[in-house]
Structure formats: structure tokens, C-alpha cells
Image (spheres, grey):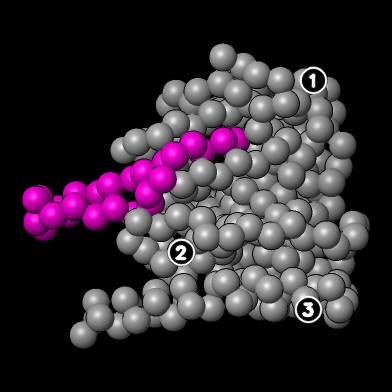
Amino acid sequence: MKTANAPALDLQAITCVFTSRDAPGQRYTAVQDTDLAVAPGEFVSVVGPTGCGKSTLLNIGAGLLAPSRGQVSVFGEPLQGLNRRAGYMFQAESLMPWKTALDNVMAGLVFAATPAAEARERAMAWLARVGLAGFEDRYPHQLSGGMRKRVAMAQTLILDPDIILMDEPFSALDVQTRQLMENELLELWAEPPQGKTGAAAQGRAVLFITHDLDEAIALSDRVVVLSAGPATHPIGQFVIDLPRPRNVAEIRNLPRFVDLHAQIWAVLRDEVLKGYDQQKRKVA
């Protein structure tokens, strides 16, 4: 039942167990008894060691993966099937190489049976918003890595999702391009929603997965730290009380940023070392 002031996305007591393909009797608990909520208009980042289950939680929130136990709610209603109020920006390249930048951006509208002229007009406007006016006819291989990420961002946001799920979307970019993309993301996220009612009118909720603690602090309202796997679960969360609007490069020089980084790293450091040791044992 829908409730007032419900989170945009609410993962409640989530446990996810996988069975090995090579050894059917062998089971692996990736995530155990995890609670994670994102309020409307809130930007939450999740950090943790490699392989700890961050992307698993994101896929559960997207409805791409059903939890073994627990419940997922979207604006107070149980999630059934795909989360159609969410847009998902993947870490890997998600553009169709045989389509132009314009065709990639308008693809979601076309699949939703939007009239072609309207879909084209909206896609042109979104390409302009992400700084790619004039590049509409370029194919992905003709664009730089940062430009392809801008196309992917427009492709995700053109559908005006109430929830934005992002899985290390900028990890492959150089530092300068990454910071430009982070600032663009913050500007687009901060824009007031148009034509929204109810909780969605409070703004888009973002659940952002990253390995980069600096990135998490610079972008977020709140940072959640996960333990090393197996059976990962939150072991700390930190409110990021830095002023907005933010420039992600400049804000890293603030004393409060340095203080927050030290606090979070003190919790995260041991888990990263545990995760590193586990990876070494798997290779050995």
C-alpha cells in the first residue's frame, strides 16, 4: 500500500543467494539482510570493496534481479517486475554501435511508441543539453569516451525517470572529463521536475555506485559503506553536509571534505583490505 513520505526506492531486508553453475550444490550469499532507502530528490552513493555486491543491489532496485528474501518498494508500492520509474546508466558501453547519437538517445521514446517527430525533437534538445549539438549524426565510434557517456546520460534522462540508477558510469574516463561529467550530472539532477506530482515533484532520486570515495563525497547527500563479501551489508552511512551547488573539483579542497573523507575511509579501509585478500586467494 502506498504511504505518505515513502522513499523513492526502498530495499528492505534484502538477501541475495546465487547457485554456482559449475557446482550446483554450492551456494554463495552475495548480499544479506540489507536495508537501503533513497528519498525523493536525494543523491545517495554506495561504496565498498570490489565484488562486495554493489551492482547486485542496483540490479535488484532496477527489477532486473529478484532478491532471495526481502522486499523492494518504489514510492511505497511493492516492486513487481521491472522498475519502470527508474532509468539505468551502466558502467559498460550501452550505446548501439549501428545507430547515430540521435537515434541512440531517442531509442527509448521510440520503444515507448512516442510519435517520431516528437521523439526526434526531444532527442535533439537533450543532445544540446549535454553539449552535443551538432553531433547528432555521429556514430559511437566517432565520439570520444566522454562524448559517448554524454549520449548515454541523455539516453537515460530523456525518459524523465523519477529514480536514476548509475553503476560506476564515469569510471573509464580521464580525470578531467570525469569531473566535467560529474558536474553535468549534478546540474541535470538539480533541475526542478516538470509536470510531476506527489513525491516525485521533490526531485529525482539517485542511487550511484562507485569505487571512488572522492567522487561519492563530491556528488552525494549521503554515502553508504558496504562490508566486504560474502554476505555484504551496510556498515556505515554518512550525511554529506557540504554546500550546494557544488563544483566537484573545487569542493575537494574544503576542510569539511577532507574531514568527511577521513571519517569514511576509516570505516572503508579494513573492508577494502579484506576484499583484496579475498581476490588474491581466488587467484592463487
Element type at marker 3? Answer: helix
Res 146 seen here? no
Q: Residue tagged by mark 3?
A: 258
Q: Is residue 95 left or right of residue 114?
A: left
N-term mark: 3 or 1: 1
Q: Residue tagged by mark 1?
A: 197
- Residue 168, position in %: x, y? 57, 61
Q: Residue at x 74, y 57 (%)?
A: 239
Q: Residue at x 86, y 78 (%)?
A: 255
Relative to 199, does residue 224 appear above or below in the rendering?
below
Q: Is residue 103 left or right of residue 25?
A: right
Quadrant showing the C terminus: bottom left
Q: CA distance from mark 2 to mark 3?
A: 22 Å
Q: Is residue 107 left or right of residue 262?
A: left
Judge the density around disc 1: few (<14), some (14-19), many (≥20) Cα neighbours within 10 Å.
few
Q: CA distance from mark 1 to mark 2?
A: 37 Å
- Residue 77, position in %: x, y? 56, 21
Reply yes or no: does residue 195 show up in magenta: no
